[in-house]
Image (tube, rainbow, N blue to C red):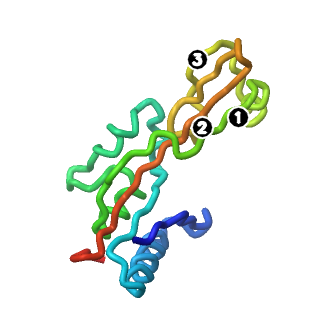
């Protein structure tokens, strides 16, 4: 099995179908090496608009045609991938409250969860411990290369 680490498209080149081409190239590499699958840890691009929805629910949201609502999940889905697992803490960022205020240009006057632009879920602030903590989830998608459409 081949694992993707990242597939990043320059923001000025987005919307031109390049992400699908990157995935097709990864699938081709896996096939050239006789591998049975490509697994991709995916950070859904539209999830930032829904930070209060748990990822487990978000990945099940679909459009009327049955495709995932999220464009990045949909790109994988169109190439035959399926969601195999939600990883709740793919990346953890902890820092002092002052750090979080600097990073986000926001104020955190009380302890509790805060919606922060660009985050997939709330940042949790603990004023007593002087800590902010963000746990970035992701979704593992599996591209089976035995009978795959790509």
Quadrant hosting residue 65: bottom left
Going 67% across and 26% down the picture, which residue do you hit? 132
Q: Are marks 1 and 2 in contact (CB under 8 Å)?
A: yes
Residue hosting label 1: 104
What mark, if any, has residue 6 been given in the picture? none
Q: Secondary structure at mark 3?
A: strand
Q: Quadrant of the C terminus?
A: bottom left
In front of the other: label 2 or label 3? 3
- The spot of residue 93 in percent (x, y) is 65, 38
Q: Earlier in the sequence, mark 3 or mark 1?
A: 1
Residue hosting label 3: 112
Q: Callout 1 environment at 10 Å: few (<14), some (14 to 19), or many (20+)?
A: few
- The spot of residue 130 in percent (x, y) is 74, 19
Q: Are marks 2 and 3 in contact (CB under 8 Å)?
A: no
Q: Secondary structure at mark 1?
A: helix
What mark, if any, has residue 117 been given in the picture? 2
Q: How many numbered marks are there?
A: 3
Q: Earlier in the sequence, mark 2 or mark 3?
A: 3
CA gap, disc 2 and disc 3? 16 Å
């Amino acid at each position: 099995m081949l694992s993707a680490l990242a597939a990043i498209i320059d923001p000025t080149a987005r919307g031109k179908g390049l992400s699908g081409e990157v995935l097709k190239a990864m699938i081709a590499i896996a096939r050239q090496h006789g591998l049975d699958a490509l697994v991709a840890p995916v950070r859904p691009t539209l999830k930032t608009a829904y930070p209060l929805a748990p990822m487990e629910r978000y990945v099940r949201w679909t459009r009327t045609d049955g495709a995932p609502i999220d464009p990045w999940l949909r790109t994988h889905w169109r190439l035959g991938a399926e969601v195999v697992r939600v990883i709740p803490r793919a990346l953890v960022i902890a820092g002092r409250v002052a750090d979080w205020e600097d990073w986000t240009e926001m104020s955190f006057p009380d302890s509790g969860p805060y919606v922060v632009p660009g985050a997939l879920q709330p940042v949790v602030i603990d004023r007593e411990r002087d800590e902010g903590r963000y746990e970035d989830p992701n979704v593992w998608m599996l591209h089976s290369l035995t009978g795959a459409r790509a």
